Image: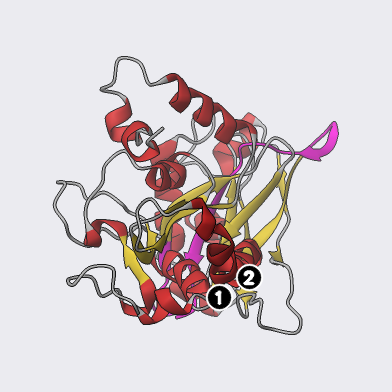
Amino acid sequence: MDRNSRLEILAEYQRIPRPETETLMIEEWLREIPFVLSANIHGGALVANYPFDGSIDGDTKPSPSPDDATFQALARSYSKYNMAMKTQRPKCAPNENFKEGITNGAAWYSVSNGMQDYNYMESNCFELTLEISCEKYPSATKLPEFWKENRKSLLNFILQVHGGVKGMVYGRSADGQLPLADATIRVVNITDPDDPVHIRHYVTSNQNGDYFRLLRPGKYLIGAIKPGYEPMLINVTIKHLPDVGDATYEEAQRADFILVKLSRYSESRSISHLSSDDGFDVEQLEALFNAVDKQASGYRKGFEDVEEDEEEDED
């Protein structure tokens, strides 16, 4: 199966009368298992390729995702231990020269319906395409050589699941506290407190209430949001990324959330200009985090809750 021709990203998925059976099976697989990081391996070049693979108009040009910096770090985590890929020696084609052995997919050539874009847009998973040989269809006798050349790169890439933040989301109500599925995890990069950046790509807690969010080192405001519950924000500092070359390394930074279930009264009182009978919808969630984005002074003072300002306005 040629996955690059069969796995549809959302924009084109709607135009296809019925996806291929293999596509439906992989989509179901991705929904059932909350993958964090993955890669598909090709031949024909020496490069670690990261999203977006496709550009909006189909032209060959850079098409960065909201997590472009994180994807570049993931790609480097692989290429740094594959000397042929990192140094671009040998060159697989005269016009190919990938700095550090990495490239944005669409900047190389635009491909629509790719699996790595689908994973990023439709699941919690970050995926790369690893081109590990100048030969498109190498002989099976070369597999031991490929393993030797890529073993350390693969191990280092796998370690990157600990490059970010992870934790549990719980829902608390009068009946107790239980793991909460389908809570949206949102991130604002506050490394520069005067220029906070809302990373507009979101992951969700899985059926067991846990989540993983890959990020680069820096300071972040992490928010958990679920319709019908009070949002919660946590300040997190990620010091460094794991590396297989280090003598020791740590797991991802832990950040757990406890979201308190809202009554109709408390919901309309605490977020009066954003509330609805069914909780937040997508536009209202966007409005909430747009408000958080503007609270640079709040970041510097300790990341105070936006609700305090709202209560002052009500008074």
The image position of residue 301, as x and y in percent, is 57, 78
| Neighbours of disc 2 within 10 Å: few (<14), some (14-19), many (20+) | some
Task: Please tell me whether residue 263 is drawn above or below residue 198 in the rendered image.
Answer: above
Q: Amino acid at mark 2?
A: Val
Q: Amino acid at mark 1?
A: Lys
Question: Is 105 or 260 nearer to us in this picture?
Answer: 105
| Neighbours of disc 1 within 10 Å: few (<14), some (14-19), many (20+) | some
The residue sitting at 37% across, 66% down in the picture is 47
The image position of residue 77, as x and y in percent, is 52, 72
Answer with the quarter of the image where residue 179 lies.
Answer: top right
Residue 33 at least partly seen: yes
> Which span of residues is magenta-colored?
172-198
Sequence-wise first label, 2 or 1: 1
Q: Is residue 180 magenta?
A: yes
Query: Do residues under tags 2 and 1 come within 8 Å of each other at their CB atoms?
Result: yes
Residue 221 at least partly seen: no
- Label 1 SS: strand
On residue 120, which mark appears? none
Question: Is 181 or 100 nearer to us in this picture?
Answer: 100
Answer with the quarter of the image where residue 205 lies.
Answer: top right
Residue ID for mark 2: 236
Question: Is 110 or 147 nearer to us in this picture?
Answer: 147
The residue sitting at 42% across, 48% down in the picture is 116
The image position of residue 172, as x and y in percent, is 78, 40
Answer with the quarter of the image where residue 99 lies.
Answer: bottom left
Residue ID for mark 1: 219
